[in-house]
Amino acid sequence: MTLLRDEALAGAFDRAAPRYDTLVALNPGYHAHLRRSARRLGLPGDGAGARVLDVGCGTGASTAALRAVLPRAEVTAADASAGMLARAAGKPWAAPVTFVHASAERLAEEGVRGPFDAVFAAYLLRNVADPDAVLAGLRGLLAPGGRLVVHEYALSGRRADRLVWNAVCRGFVAPLGNALGDGALYRHLWRSVVDFDTAGAFGQRLARAGFRDVRVLPLPGWQTGITYTFTGRVPA
Ligand SMILES: C[S@@+](CC[C@H](N)C(=O)[O-])C[C@H]1O[C@@H](n2cnc3c(N)ncnc32)[C@H](O)[C@@H]1O
């Protein structure tokens, strides 16, 4: 199983984009869990006056969670895959969203300027070649006191959770990915989670990146011990 990075990963997401929303709809709780994480941004009220960045927005599932929780926030959504981003941008949005074709490593070069009051990164950081560099960049885009929420697959470190993840991938994710012609991307998904930080290690990575008040919060359902919300804030 080969991990995909950078252009190879963006190309795989480009090809998979037309089927992405159908696939995630099969994952119980996918959208509800994104909204739960978006609420963890802790922005007051309906988000009026706040600037929020959705980095790695994909087809817009995380953007929709932000819009549901913070209907009046000013939202910028960026992704490295033109195919995923086009799907997101083509959806009807109740309030405008600024979509930017940019990798998390090159946000500034593509015109994404801080300060943001909050950054949301859903299912992104396990995919990047250098998570520390990306976290440093996101930290630099946040206003003093600004909040980062990372919503991510990360294993608890318990053997039972690793076995569940491998069983779900072997029995469901990999066969479905192969049947749809997206086998390489879904093998990447399987392996990237196994290779990524455990939840505790990722929390420590956030603290090393300069985020304060880091919290590691398991999500409910079959994903418990496999999917987490991580929160942190830039010192005020
Ligand atoms: C699993 S999808 C998640 C999309 C969305 N956030 C959601 O919650 O459904 C991961 C997205 O991250 C994007 N991505 C991966 N690596 C990236 C990078 N280095 N910079 C920006 N986007 C990246 C992919 O193109 C893909 O659209």
Image (cartoon, helix red, strand yellow):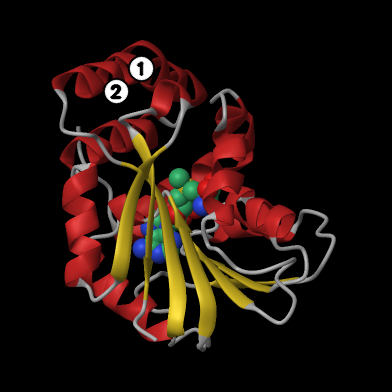
Residue 173 visible here = yes
**Neighbourhood count class around disc 1 (C-alpha, 10 Å): few under 14, some 14–19, many 20 upward:** some
Residue 36: percent from left, percent from top: 56, 45
Type of amino acid at the residue the image marks with label 2: Trp
Residue at (56%, 24%) from the top-left corner?
A: 28
Q: Which mark is residue 168?
A: 1
Residue 79 visible here = no
Q: Taking 83 as reference, is 103 above or below it?
A: below
Say what secondary structure mark 1 lies in.
Answer: helix
Residue receiving disc 2: 165
Residue 147: percent from left, percent from top: 45, 71
Q: Taking 120 as reference, is 75 above or below it?
A: below
Residue at (28%, 77%) from the top-left corner?
A: 136
Quadrant of the drawing holding the C terminus: bottom left
Q: Which mark is residue 229?
A: none
Quarter of the image where one finds residue 105: bottom left
What's the CA distance linking mark 1 and mark 2? Answer: 5 Å
Q: Nearer the viewer, residue 166 or 234?
A: 234
